[in-house]
Image: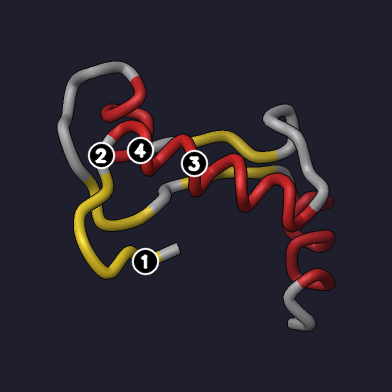
Amino acid sequence: MQAEKPMNREEVIRNYRRFLADTRLSTDDVWLGGGSALIIHGLRETTMDLDAGCRQNTMRKVARHFNR
């Protein structure tokens, strides 16, 4: 997800939770990495996107959700 403006910690959390709810996935399925993880741990203040990782079977679910 690419943001229109830099996201702070609260916005990263809100957008991550929205993504999980929209795709009916859990934090066990999709985790934050990169700049998003740095923000969560207080090591960075903003980011322009959600960096996330998942396993291959979860990627298939996400692809089906977005018709890809």
User: Disc 1 residue type?
Assistant: Gln
Q: CA distance from mark 4 to mark 3?
A: 12 Å
Residue 68: percent from the left, percent from the top? 74, 82
State which tag comes first along the sequence, 2 or 3: 2
Mark identifier at residue 8: 2
State which tag comes first along the sequence, 4 or 1: 1
User: Disc 3 residue type?
Assistant: Arg
User: Disc 4 residue type?
Assistant: Ser
Q: CA distance from mark 4 to mark 1?
A: 12 Å
Q: Residue at x 61, y 49 (%)?
A: 18
In the picture of the structure, the residue carrying the numbered disc 1 is: 2
Q: CA distance from mark 3 to mark 1?
A: 14 Å
Q: Quadrant of residue 2?
A: bottom left
Secondary structure beneath label 3? helix
Q: CA distance from mark 2 to mark 1?
A: 13 Å
State which tag comes first along the sequence, 4 or 3: 3
Relative depth, front residue between 42 and 54:
42
In the picture of the structure, the residue carrying the numbered disc 4 is: 36
State which tag comes first along the sequence, 3 or 1: 1
Location of residue 24 with respect to 39 vertically, above or below: below
Residue 36: percent from the left, percent from the top? 35, 38
Secondary structure beneath label 4? helix
Q: Residue furthest bottom?
A: 67
Quarter of the picture holding the N terminus: bottom left
